[in-house]
Amino acid sequence: MKDVRLLADPFNPGQLVGPFTNAHPGLGGVCTFVGEVRGDDGVEALELTHYEPLTLAGMDALADAALARFDLMGILIAHRVGEMRAGEPIVLVSAAARHRRSAIQAVDFAMDHLKSDAWFWKREKRGGQWHWIDPRPEDHADLARWTS
Amino acid sequence: MGVKLVFLGRLADLTGVAEREVSAPLDWSTLLDALQGELGGWLASDKVKLAVNGTLLADKMALQANDGDEVALLPPVSGG
């Protein structure tokens, strides 16, 4: 199964992964990555803006690409938007497969693409002021791992 | 009715609004006129992309939008 969601409110990863796992009887493994808002010095809040027509469609296409590339039974991609504080989950990718390596690689693949190639604009609040976050060169290097 | 412009990320800070209605039809040169330099060098920069009704334009100078269309102005993403 493919389950792709944009979430406007805080979420509990376990409440998504539990049903996702149960939906794939006979699986050999589930690999889950949960990204949280890092507690960097002086960062009071993080805000993610998205553009619904592109952002959700792009995440859906990414899920399709992972299903086509790896031997999966299912993939779950959930991403927060809106304002968040340190320690809140921001992204969840979970892949179910008959064998572990496909699940692990699919999660790595999806995360590299979400971090560099997804339609999100991020800004963080420091000292009461919002600052936009520019893309990092490392993100593009991470993406290049999957082009061969 | 006109064309709805949607400003994403820092472009919304530059215009001071997330959305704006402009008159139709809209092409690249009337878009430049409508924004009158509000976006500084961003609009002409190849870092900014345009989408019409959710479809990304390969060449933004080929923009053609009519009554009821939504044109999104997209600065570089910061990723998820």
Image (tube, coloured by chain):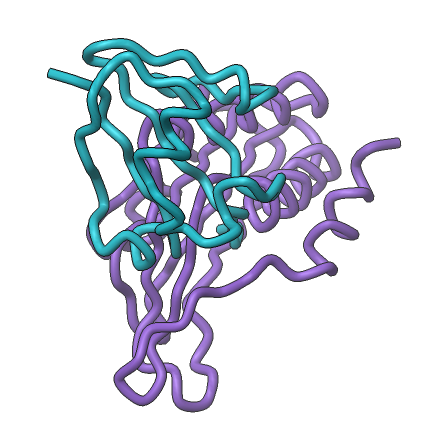
Chain colours: A purple, B cyan
Residue B68's x, y, as percent?
19, 13
Q: Is residue B50 above or below residue A120?
A: above
Residue B27 makes an appearance in the image: yes
Residue B49's x, y, as percent?
52, 34
A38 sits left or right of B45 in the view: left
Residue at x 44%, y 25% (from the top left corner):
B29
Residue at x 40%, y 89% (from the top left corner):
A42
Residue A22 makes an appearance in the image: no
- Check the picture and name the quadrant holding the N terminus of chain B: top left
Query: Between A9 and B64, which is closer to the camera in this rendering?
Result: B64
- Image quarter for residue A7? top left
Please state the total of marks drawn on the protein image. 0
A112 sits left or right of A141 in the view: left
Query: Between B45 and B49, which is closer to the camera in this rendering?
Result: B45
- Image quarter for residue A114? top right
Residue B27's x, y, as percent?
41, 18
A30 sits left or right of A48 in the view: right
Residue at x 60%, y 57% (from the top left corner):
A135
Query: Between A146 and A1, which is closer to the camera in this rendering?
Result: A146
Residue B63's x, y, as percent?
46, 17
Q: Which residue lies furthest to the right in this view?
A: A148
Residue at x 34%, y 25% (from the top left corner):
B71
Q: Residue furthest left?
A: B1
- Image quarter for residue A145? top right
